[in-house]
Image (tube, rainbow, N blue to C red):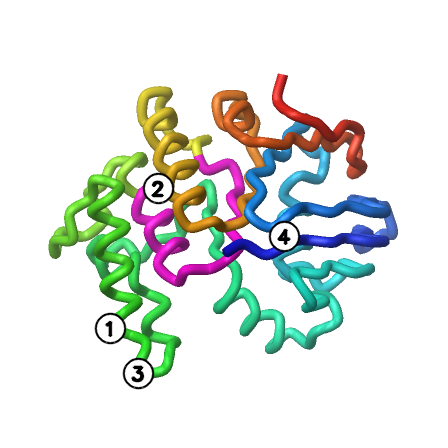
Amino acid sequence: MGLPLSVSGLTVRSARGRVLLDVPELTVEAGALVGLRGPSGAGKSTFLYAIAGLLEQAEGRVLWGDDDLLALRPAGRAAFRAGRIGMIFQDFLLFEELGAGDNAAIAALFRPRGERAALRARAAAHLQALGIGNGARSVASFSGGERQRVAIARALAAEAPVLLADEPTASLDRASADRLIDDLVRLTRDLGATLIAVSHDTRLTDRMKRVLTLVDGRIEADGVPA
């Protein structure tokens, strides 16, 4: 089951004091599918990294359920992400020398011994559902679409209640991107996770239930896809 998000007074400033992000208030229901769009430089990725607790300069409150992520120390934020947030990046962030299975189950290395087998099994199951074999072939030989599917399986394997995606289709051709969107939406719904996806791809944002438009670091529109 997904986690609800409640943001208040969220601001991010550059080293010179320029406001990069200003979100006075925002709530997202548990299990919601939310797209975030806007021009380049609008602050979309900044917002995503702020609500993931990845920006030390972020100020305000970011409540995932009852946990205020920004109130935690760095080690606490890292622990929260490890257990509650799955992240999908544009550039995949895979270990090139490892196969699909080892990449998708990489989080098992940081889990208690008793949890590792179950996580590896979930990773293998998600790879199969995404049409990726769990063989020994390294991901260095994979296509962009295959790599992104491995990254999604990695995010899903931990059964995180929150999925955050940053331009997940940007490196893919149209056909691969469309297949990936179908898989991402289907698997997210199956898990009941909360999904927030930054994208310029209208095919992706049109599949969301709610779309936020960010301009100059501020949310200018909040509604359903056109």
Amino acid type indicated by mark 4: Tyr
* Mark 3 vs 4, N-terminal side: 4
Mark 3 nearby-residue class (10 Å; few <14, some 14–19, many ≥20): few
On the image, numbered disc 3 is attached to which residue? Answer: 113
Q: Nearer the viewer, residue 196 or 141?
A: 196
Mark 4 nearby-residue class (10 Å; few <14, some 14–19, many ≥20): some
Rounded to the nearest whole Å, what is the CA distance between mark 4 and mark 2? 19 Å
On the image, numbered disc 1 is attached to which residue? Answer: 117
Q: Residue drawn 58% across and 42% down?
A: 32
* Mark 1 vs 2, N-terminal side: 1
Amino acid type indicated by mark 2: Gln
Q: Is residue 160 magenta?
A: yes
* Mark 3 vs 2, N-terminal side: 3
* CB under 8 Å between discs 4 and 2: no
On the image, numbered disc 4 is attached to which residue? Answer: 49
**Magenta region, residue range:** 149-168
**Numbered circle sitting on residue 148:** 2
Image location (x, y in percent) of residue 95: 31, 57
Q: Is residue 37 left or right of residue 9?
A: left
| Above or below, comparing residue 208 to residue 132 in the picture | above
Rounded to the nearest whole Å, what is the CA distance between mark 3 and mark 2? 27 Å
Q: Residue drawn 68% across and 76% down?
A: 73
Q: Nearer the viewer, mark 1 or mark 2?
A: 1
